Amino acid sequence: MSRRPVAVALSLLVPGALGWAALAPVEAVSREELFEIPPGTSARRIAGEELEILPQTIRLGVNDVLVLKNADAAPHVFGPTLIMPGQTFRLPFTTAATYSFLCTAHADGQLNVIVAPRPAAGWERLRWRWSTLTNAG
Amino acid sequence: MTVRSRPILAAALLAVLVAGAAIAFFTGEAAQPQALRAGAFDPPHAAPEFALRGSDGSEVTLARYRGKVVLLTFGFTHCAAVCPTTLATLAQARSGLGEAADSVQVIFVTVDPERDSAAHMREYLAAFDRGFIGATGTPEALAEAREAYGVTATREGTGPDYAMAHTSSIFLIDRTGRLRAVMPFGHDAADFVHDVAFLLES
């Protein structure tokens, strides 16, 4: 008899939480994608070593922030800009689109950032929240 | 609904809210957006100085505009799409700033000194905003300025109708001459108004 309230609460809680996760709008989500130029990069490049620190294409979501950090002792053109030693560059993306930047770090001189739109309400949003939740752990 | 079931329902609704808040917290949905809409440098350094020939006949340096927010961009007047779009956006942003527009200076550094004379740039820029200033110089001085900002410019095509592929970002320099941020091409005037207002207040 005493288990009944718990069962009723759970029967409301589980579908309620799933419904919230599937339907609640995704607003201020902001995740950071960090890429770092490690110390010694300049010396290794001068020595003729080929280094691919930044991928040709980076995939982000709306409101995500691309973080580029230069931990080397020399300035580097890294993605869309020149970054001084010890400096971090934080570039937010608020609109879903494909962005192309001139980038001398790549062989073809181009860096692409693909920003995916917010997940649509329903199964897509539920799956996105589940994936974000499990990745955050 | 019975009187006894009401507390249970209330507890379940509260639990849903708590679960939602917890999911939002752990998925990062409670994160605060950063202050600038442009890409920001941390820590900011002094913006590289240059001394070029201005479209008004004077010397253009950053020191000359200390106390103002400088929006620095590189381009060429024969550009078909990117440069006119950037300049139109910056003009719209300046007019959106109202009285604060007087505290903003747009500098347009040419990547095509062969065709962009000071006089031609003055006429071209005036079509967007009479407050804009163009900057040109020797190919070496311009190349040096580009290198200091990590800007690239490559000639494309032959003959008189050649084009220039170039970095299209806009550099945001604060009132003390520090390079604070870079706005990639494609942002609208509202983003510039937001970031310039932030730099003027900070």
Image: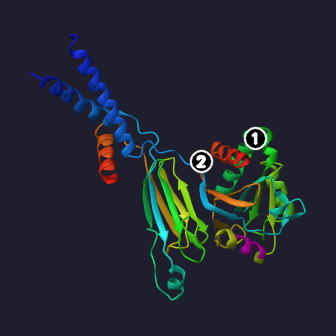
Q: Amino acid at mark 1?
A: Ser
Please name whichever residue, A10 or B83, is drawn nearer the observer in this view of the structure.
A10
* Chain under callout 1: B
Q: Amino acid at mark 2?
A: Ala
Q: What residue is shown at x 34% (from left), y 52% (from top)? A: A136
Q: Nearer the viewer, residue B47 or A48?
A: B47
Q: Is residue A58 above or below residue A136?
A: below
Residue A41 belongs to magenta span: no
State the image quarter where residue A3 is shown.
top left
Label 2 crowd (10 A; few <14 / some 14-19 / many >=20): few
Say whether disc 1 or disc 2 marks the residue closer to the N-terminus: 2
Q: Which mark is residue B35?
A: 2
Cα–Cα gap, marks 1 and 2: 22 Å
- Residue in the image at 17% along x and 23% along y: A5
Residues in magenta, as a range: B141-146
The residue most toward the right is: B57
Disc 2 is placed on an element classified as loop
What label sits on residue A57 in the rendered view? Answer: none
Q: Which chain is disc 2 placed on?
A: B
**Label drawn at residue B95:** 1
For the point 20% across and 10% down, which residue is it? B2
Nearest to the eye among marks 1 and 2: give it. Answer: 2
